[in-house]
Image: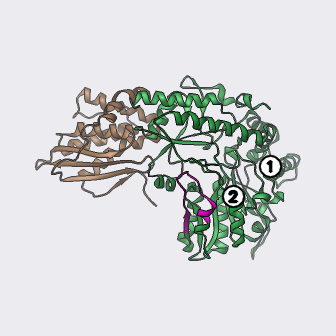
Chain colours: A brown, B green
Amino acid sequence: MNLKELYQEIILDHGKNPRNLRKTENFNKDAKGYNPLCGDKVHVFLKLNENKKIEDISFEGSGCAISMASASLMTDLVKDKEEKEARDLIKDFLDMIKEKPELVTKSLSEDEKTKLMSLSGVKQYPMRVKCATLAWHTLTSAITNSQEEINTEKFD
Amino acid sequence: MNIDNIKKEFPIFNNKVHNNDLVYLDSANSSQKPQVVIDRIYDFYSKEFSNVGRSIHYLAVAATNMYENTRVSVQKFINAKDKNEIVFTKGATEAINLVASTYGQKYLKSGDEVLLTELEHHSNYVPWHYLRKSKGVKIEFADVNDDGEVTLESIEKKINSKTKMIAITHLSNVTGAILPIKEITQLAHSKNIPVLVDGCQGAPHLKLDMQDLDCDFYAISCHKMYGPTGLGILYAKKKWLEELPPYQGGGGMIGEVKKEGITYGDLPNKYEAGTMQTAQVIAFNESIKFLNKIGIENIMKHESELINYGQEILRKNNSVKLIGNPKNKGSVLSFTLDGIHPHDIATVLDEDGVAIRAGHHCCQILHDKLNIPASARASLGVYNTKDDLDKLNNALNNCKKIFNTK
């Protein structure tokens, strides 16, 4: 899939009408992410229940279509997952965006995998990979409660 | 040489990008290379290669003479008083680092101020930032106004008895504003402050006269002037090159080397340590000949017509917001598009063969001031035409269609 097709399908859908773009009531975990190169900003909110299941997830933020679509897809896919499943999915997604040809997770349906794989188009554009991964790194930070603001460019 | 047909001198335009003709609007980043420059690099490596300034065999002498010929061409091109005021560097960035480091080392102390502007490229900020850490030097920024300009008055406002260096751009790579360098230099010199000019965008687009501008330092990027990468030029008044300490140590820059001590070479060798960019320097002479053949006045006229045309058509495009409206404007059109992030614009335009830049263009200070994270930028070179700008506008309209914005 070339990037134009990518834009026309998933990214435009999610970029223009992002899912879960709100703030979860009674969230108990959250983290912020920032990509100073593009100005992409994302704030992820989670409600983890006592069984370590993600009862609700949402995000607030602004940025390019790829970063917003990625956050939108991510929140859609990890909702109702166990924390462990979510961590595995994050790792799987990041591996795929960096080097692996496909997703190996068993926690997604084929349809869901296809949707997520649409973001693999950014692989050809190394400068855009950080746009696609920002929300996912931020989710990791929220789950692990590290209170660390994700910044794609660390200050020296 | 007819400027209307200049595109055919650049072989890159024979190639297609995503099956489209290339519309190259990223010359402020780096310019394309004419065939004469490419050929010169090939010929030098195939038939004439040798290191310069060391051996005395036939090839070495010939290469040294060609290398020094470029220095004289540059001297004439920028009307410097002396050929030894021309120092070759790895880029304009190194030229500015050279001055910040050596001037800082010798003349700056804690509490002294370096005055920059909010328009500066990171390469004319970060080298001075180092002096904050090493010397406790303070950095001040002259304000940019709503039109994207920095005026003489805004510079004057920030000058005080602590100001020990003024380092400013000649032509902003974001707003296109051309700064009144001669007036700023007069003001600075009346207060005994030296002036460094970042000429990365000035040199390819403006007629340069160092003796008239009277600045102390002028940094040039050769790859933005239709020349090879890896090469820059520092123009510095002779008295500075004599007074300042050497920057890098190594072969070629020394006089005598003993166990007890070292003396340094004469100008310009003192600042050209190690094996230099021999092929690039020799090929850059062809870039200067190319510019001279067209005539810098003709280039300025051509680009000025294009920039006026570009502003006119983009202003008619309702969702385009141009950044800055300087009275004296060079070859840059920066803009935002309602509802579409600049990186998305650049990616979609690329599919139509239209190459622009998106981001902060190494000017985060300015983008913070404008309160936008990024902008899109179309920048012009000698090969651009009105047709290129029409194609830019059409591609922007395509982009709006894809994103379904108005």
The chain carrying label 1 is B
Q: Residue furthest left?
A: A50
Q: Position of residue B75 (x, y in %)?
A: 81, 53
Residue B181's label in the rendered image is 2
Q: Which residue is pictured at 67% across the width and 48% down the height?
A: B230
Rendered-image quadrant of the N terminus of chain B: top right
Q: Mark 2 falls on what kind of element?
A: helix
> Residue at label 1?
B77
In the image, residue B322 above or below residue B269: above
Q: Residue B284: image x %, image y %?
A: 76, 44
x and y percent of residue A10 in the render?
A: 33, 30
Q: Looking at the picture, tell me which residue is in the foreground, B3 or B9.
A: B3
Three-letter code for the amino acid on which mark 2 is drawn: Ile
Amino acid carrying label 1: it is Phe
Residue B318 visible in the picture: yes
Residues B310 and A62: in front is: B310
Q: Which residues are magenta?
A: B139-155
In the visual, does B287 lie left or right of B314?
A: right
x 23%, y 37%: residue = A76
Secondary structure of residue under mark 1: helix
Instruction: Using residue B145 as the reference point, say whether residue A106 is left or right of it.
Output: left
Is residue B103 covered in magenta? Answer: no
